[in-house]
Image: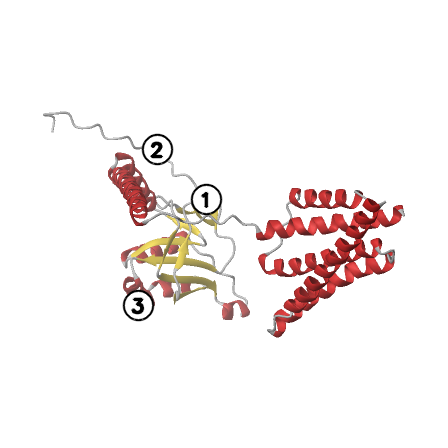
Amino acid sequence: MSRKYIVFTLISILVGFMIAIQFRAVKEPIVRDTRDTWQLREDLQKEKELELRLLREIRSNEEKIAQYETDRLHGKEQVLKDTLDELKSEAGLTVVKGHGLILTISPIEEEMLLGKPVGKISPDLLKRLLNELNRYGAQYVSIDDHRVINSTVIRDINNETKIDGYSIQSLPIEIKVIAENQQAAELLYKRMQVSKSAEDFFIDHLRLETAKANKEITIPAYEDSIRIMHMEPVKSAEGGSS
Amino acid sequence: MWLPVLGLIIGLFFGFMTDIKIPEEYSNYLSIAVLAALDTLFGGIRAHLQDMYDEMVFVSGFFFNIILAAGLAFLGVHLGVDLYLAAIFAFGVRLFQNIAVIRRILLTKWTSKKEK
């Protein structure tokens, strides 16, 4: 008898549960919109006003942003920063990308077969080549991935050619040159093809090959800090002294 | 006697308390299932009053009817025929019959008690 009741109770719990869930699923309060035209119009008016206010706010904020932007652009700080960047790139402290040439200096293999000594790049030869490149419109140069800047020193130390203290380890080495633009690069290439440098290198048992870079080449930045020893800022001219 | 009613109330309470929500497209099936469950419940009450109650028939009938009703509705949706109407019709008619029988039995019991 009691078992029957328990079964009944369980089933009725289930039924109640199902009914409740069904109720929740179906019972969604539908709020009828009972506003008439006039009320709708008023509500619309309110919303429009809100929209207008928001638009005005957006506009004023945008104006503020623009003002800050111009302030920033014309500010002294920005000018200083621009100048600094300019000077840095001029001094060779930035990575440079552009069109240019890749010169390769390699030993002459045919002579090596004949048993002749492998040539050494002498500093004079390198200086001469750099001068030539500079004369023909090279803007940025790197030798064996070391940036050449105005104060770069190429010299012979203990029978080793060193560029700013870095020795040229093994041949072949690459000299990357970037010209002002693609036209200038083309011009430089033609000039280097007829230059005498190749012959000079040949005398030293080296081969200088000039190749046009198909893509933009990258020249690394100068790695060391530039030490300025004998220089001091010019004192601003006082009134009447100049 | 009052235990099943208490169970129903407990079930309702739990149903409203829990946060189970069935998707709208399945609420049809649940409504059919509820109908089938109610039919079985009243069938059970009638059987109990007529002293014909069989536990196996009751329990199996409960689940089988629910599954059959929901399956019929499902088939109807996929065939494009409103087959759930058949279930509603069958269960509805039986529900009324069962309740009518229960009412008569209770009435006769009541009147016989009164005559005594």
Residue pointed to by mark 2:
A229
Cα gap from disc 1 to disc 2, whole angstroms:
18 Å
Of the image marks 3 and 1, the number of the one nearer the N terminus? 1
Asked which quadrant contains residue B90, the reply is bottom right
Cα distance between the residues tagged 3 and 1:
32 Å
Give the vertical position of A41 relative to A116 (above or below): above
The chain identifier of the residue carrying mark 2 reads: A
Quick one: SS at disc 2?
loop
Residue A190 is marked as 3
Q: Nearer the viewer, residue A45 or A14?
A: A14
Given the image, on which type of amino acid does mark 1 rest?
Answer: Gly
* Residue at point 47%, 63% (across, down): A106
| Circle 1 residue | A165
Nearest to N terminus: mark 1 or mark 2: 1
Relative to residue A154, is residue B83 drawn left or right? right
Q: Position of residue A112 (x, y in %)?
A: 53, 67
Can the viewer see residue B41?
Answer: no
The amino acid sitting under disc 2 is Met
Q: Are marks 1 and 2 on the same chain?
A: yes
Which three-letter amino acid code belongs to the residue tagged 3?
Lys
Write the residue at 59% across / 73% down.
B80
Separation (CA) of disc 3 from disc 2 = 39 Å
Count the labels in the image: 3
Crowdedness near tag 1: few (<14), some (14–19) or many (≥20) residues, C-alpha within 10 Å: few
**Along the line of sight, which residue is nearer the eye, A95 or B83?**
B83
Q: Is residue A215 visible?
A: yes
Q: How is the image coloured?
A: secondary structure
In the figure, is residue A153 to the left or right of B46? left
